[in-house]
Structures are given as structure tokens and as C-alpha cells.
Amino acid sequence: MEISPAEWQVMRIAWTLQKVTSSQVIEILQRKKNWKPATVKTLLRRLVQKKVLVTTKQGRYFIYQPCVQEQETMNLAADDLFSSMCEMHVGRTLAHVIEEHQLSKKDISNLQELLNKKALNAPDAVECNCVPGEEMHCE
């Protein structure tokens, strides 16, 4: 499923609140991004069409709820990103993400544990997977 950067902003609100009206999303995104109500309504409509949000009517209001799990959706987006890059760059890209983003002590401990397990069977070097059958050296 393709979710645009703008749609991610809407989904972050929907995942956080679980049930949200268009008015709530509009208010939050006007404060956060200065977006117009029509923009937000377009994004909500697209997300419903993509079956990422479901909407139900309660009185005069439409209530939006996520149809997909937040972590699963983020994992799929990350998998999609990493599957499109050279295997030789994955480690450096992960290092960049770790350097640039705040992590809790628990996150760091979990990552250290995962890396220790991964190190047991890790190859000495990761081969380029850009051109099958060719020995390439991406840098």
C-alpha cells in the first residue's frame, strides 16, 4: 500500500486517537502544518479509498478509524525502502537512522540484543545485489 508523506501525517493522528472526526484532524493539521480543510478532507477521502481508514457516520459527523496496524504499516514501508536499495548500503543507512533519531534506553537495549544475535551468523561482507551475476562494488 502506498501512503504519501501527507497521508502519513493524517494516519499518525488516526493511530494516536483511534477514532477521529474530520474536524479534529483539520484542527490538528492546521496547527501543525497550516493545511487548509479541503486538503485534509481530500487526504481523508484518499485514505478511505485505499482502505487504510474506515468511516462511519454518527449523527452529523463522520468518524474515521484506522483499518491497518501502525507498526505493521511502518514495517512494510521500511521493508519497501530497504528492498529498493543496494544491500551494501543497508548498514550505513541504519547507522544514519540511529544517529539522527531519538531512541529510548529500552530501544537501544533491544537493538544491542538483536545486533549481538545477528553478529553470530553475519557474513564478513555484504555483496552488492544491484546487477545480478556481476561482481559490483557500490560505494
Image: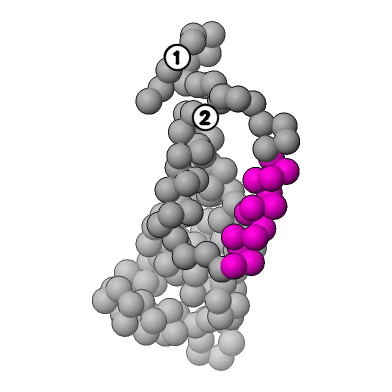
Residue at left 49%, top 69%? 12
On the rendered structure, is 78 left or right of 96?
right
On the rendered structure, is 18 left or right of 134?
right
Q: Position of residue 80 (x, y in %)?
A: 53, 41
Residue at left 65%, top 46%? 115
Q: What residue type is labelled 1?
A: Met
Residue at left 50%, top 89%? 60
Where does label 2 land, which residue? 87
Does dot 2 land on a helix, a strand or a loop?
helix
User: Is the residue 22 above or below the residue 124 in the image?
Assistant: below
- Judged by its main secondary structure, the magenta piece is helix
- What is the magenta range? 105-118
Query: In whole angstroms, how far apart are the C-alphas of marks 2 and 1?
Result: 11 Å
Callout 2 environment at 10 Å: few (<14), some (14 to 19), or many (20+)? some
Q: In which quarter of the image is residue 41?
A: bottom left
Q: Which amino acid does label 2 sit on?
A: Glu
Residue at left 60%, top 25%? 124
Where does label 1 land, which residue? 136
On the rendered structure, is 97 left or right of 119?
left
Callout 1 environment at 10 Å: few (<14), some (14 to 19), or many (20+)? few
Q: Position of residue 33 (x, y in %)?
A: 30, 73
* Closer to us: 55 or 82: 82
Q: Where is residue 31 in the image (x, y as percent from the top left)?
A: 31, 82
Q: Position of residue 105 (x, y in %)?
A: 59, 67
